């Protein structure tokens, strides 16, 4: 599994209980998946997802609480909308929207969360060719990102 | 700030913290089960606040109907309620709806209270909805009690005597309070006039407190989904039809019944009088509500340093980057961002060309970071979890 697609997951600190699933910042069952804990799924800025893909990640996903039960009331709905928008933008740039995912799982949904991540990773593995890096990995262009945003 | 993703938060050390963590896990476990029956969008526990509001609305509508027929006097009080029940077309049904919607209201309110307590939804500046919620609970409970008084049957009479006894048990102000409550030295026509006012006045005040309750929420969920509205309205009508609300024997000046039908939702303090002195019950009630008000301040499930990324500081606006686009203003779930006229001439090109500047109202911020996600111009940061920290973790992930 360790040579699987590089995946970055932004996971809300309140949603899935990651303590039993993680080791050294990565999922124990899928070490190619790096987890970044965030205070709320709504904290994630879509340009970070775009950046991660541009710098060579094969896939990015965001995990929030179950819809309707966001600790901060609306974070996961807002993030779902932002992910939808970003998927449309990526599609226009010929990046497969399957590389971007939005999940929603609660504290006790560890197994379901793992299954969803596994499906996400398998989906990426099945994609034809890796997207060519948009820019040099060392120098992301924030100015360019700024112009693209609505 | 320990943003290293590999760090497992240590389990809470205090006993209260461990207990509340257990309760939290239990609450969310219950959700897992309910979500298996209903899709998450329809989980009734996600709409306890909306359900309370719905029952309150039913109470207002049915209460207006009852008000047309009610006469507040010792002679007419009981008779007019009997007339509503037996004489007015559908009057008995409306009375039953009023009765059962009140029970539904208090159940929904208590579920709302415990759910938000157990899931930490009162932390940081969310203490404001908590405090207004405690006021709503006190006023709501009192309105329920005066509603039982208005029927003026034997139970109402005993309840009034018990409540007067509880008031009189208070030192110094007790006698005065009792006199104010019953409108004179003894029960008279004025007592029921006061009861009617003390039923309708605090009930109207509930809406003022609801304004306070919603003040810091953007898009508050004030109604449950349509299916639950229909189910709740149907349930109160069904109960009102199957188990009609009835009065006991009319109140008699010398009557002293030994027992009366109990309402477990509103009348628990009076049930306690079987076992405790009136003063002890008053002290207990006072202590309970004082504790209720103090919950956001006295103890926390987690110490601040245990909260990891969820306690990353109040969001800060970076003046030079803000374009005044209002996206954070629209997305903040707590109305914690205000748009103010941009001060001229501004620090940067973006600042020179904007009309508005976003300002975080720090007393309302709960440190969730939703505004950071909303901002495409890098003009907002959580002080202890910067964009730089996130980017470092992303880089580490893609390099390995």
Image (spheres, rainbow, N blue to C red):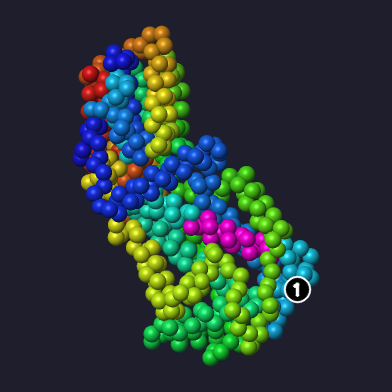
Name the residue: 37% across, 53% down: B122
Q: Visible in this render: residue A149?
A: no
Q: Residue furthest bottom?
A: B185
Residue plotted at (77% across, 70% down)? B86
Which residue is pictured at 45% across the width and 27% down the height? A85
Residue B16 visible here: yes
> Quick one: quadrant of the N terminus of chain B?
top left
Magenta stretch contains residue A90: no
Q: Position of residue B220 (x, y in %)?
A: 49, 49
Residue at the left extreme?
Answer: B1
Q: Position of residue B125 (x, y in %)?
A: 34, 54
**Magenta highlight range:** B94-110
Name the residue that disc number 1 marks.
B83
| Residue B164 falls left or right of residue B192 | left
Taking the image as shown, residue B271 lies to the left or right of residue B236, namely left
Closer to us: B198 or B302: B302
In the image, is B63 to the left or to the right of A69?
Answer: right
Picture coordinates of residue B203, whole percent (x, y): 55, 67
Q: Is residue B106 magenta?
A: yes
């Amino acid at each position: 599994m360790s040579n699987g697609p590089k995946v970055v997951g932004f996971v809300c600190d309140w949603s899935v209980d990651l303590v039993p699933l993680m080791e050294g910042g990565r999922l124990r069952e899928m070490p190619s998946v790096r987890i970044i804990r965030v205070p709320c799924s709504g904290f994630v800025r879509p340009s970070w997802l775009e950046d991660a893909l541009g710098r060579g990640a094969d896939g990015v996903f965001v995990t929030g609480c179950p819809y309707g039960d966001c600790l901060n009331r609306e974070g996961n709905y807002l993030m779902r909308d932002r992910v939808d928008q970003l998927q449309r933008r990526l599609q226009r740039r010929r990046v497969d929207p399957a590389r971007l995912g939005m999940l929603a799982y609660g504290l006790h949904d560890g197994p379901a969360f793992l299954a969803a991540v596994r499906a996400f990773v398998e989906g990426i593995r099945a994609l034809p060719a890796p997207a060519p890096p948009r820019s040099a990995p060392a120098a992301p262009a924030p100015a360019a990102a700024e112009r693209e945003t609505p | 700030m320990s943003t290293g993703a590999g760090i497992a938060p240590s389990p809470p050390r205090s006993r209260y913290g461990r207990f509340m963590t257990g309760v939290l896990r239990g609450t969310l476990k219950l959700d897992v089960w309910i979500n298996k029956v209903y899709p998450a969008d329809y989980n009734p526990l996600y709409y306890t606040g909306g359900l309370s509001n719905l029952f309150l609305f039913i109470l207002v509508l049915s209460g207006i109907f009852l008000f047309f027929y009610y006469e507040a006097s010792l002679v007419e009080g009981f008779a007019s309620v009997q007339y509503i029940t037996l004489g007015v077309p559908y009057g008995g049904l409306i009375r039953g709806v009023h009765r059962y919607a009140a029970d539904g209201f208090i159940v929904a309110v208590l579920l709302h209270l415990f759910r938000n307590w157990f899931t930490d939804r009162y932390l940081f500046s969310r203490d404001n909805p908590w405090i207004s919620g405690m006021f709503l609970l006190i006023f709501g409970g009192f309105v329920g009690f005066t509603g039982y008084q208005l029927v003026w049957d034997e139970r109402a009479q005993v309840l009034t005597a018990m409540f007067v006894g509880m008031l009189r048990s208070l030192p110094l102000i007790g006698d005065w309070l009792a006199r104010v409550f019953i409108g004179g030295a003894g029960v008279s026509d004025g007592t029921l006039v006061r009861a009617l006012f003390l039923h309708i006045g605090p009930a109207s005040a509930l809406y003022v407190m609801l304004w306070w309750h919603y003040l810091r929420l953007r898009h508050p969920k004030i109604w449950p989904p349509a299916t639950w509205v229909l189910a709740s309205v149907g349930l109160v009508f069904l109960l009102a039809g199957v188990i009609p609300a009835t009065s006991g024997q009319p109140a008699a000046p010398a009557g002293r019944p030994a027992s009366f039908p109990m309402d477990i939702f509103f009348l628990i303090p009076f049930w306690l009088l079987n076992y405790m002195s009136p003063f002890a019950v008053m002290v207990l009630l006072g202590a309970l509500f004082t504790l209720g008000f103090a919950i956001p301040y006295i103890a926390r499930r987690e110490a601040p340093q245990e909260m990891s990324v969820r306690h990353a500081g109040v969001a800060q606006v970076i003046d030079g980057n803000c374009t005044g686009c209002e996206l954070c203003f629209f997305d903040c779930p707590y109305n914690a961002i205000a748009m103010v006229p941009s001060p001229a001439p501004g620090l940067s090109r973006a600042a020179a060309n904007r009309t508005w500047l976003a300002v975080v109202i720090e007393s309302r911020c709960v440190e969730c970071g939703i505004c950071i996600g909303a901002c495409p111009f890098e003009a907002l940061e959580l002080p202890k979890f910067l964009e730089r920290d996130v980017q470092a973790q992303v880089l580490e992930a893609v390099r390995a």
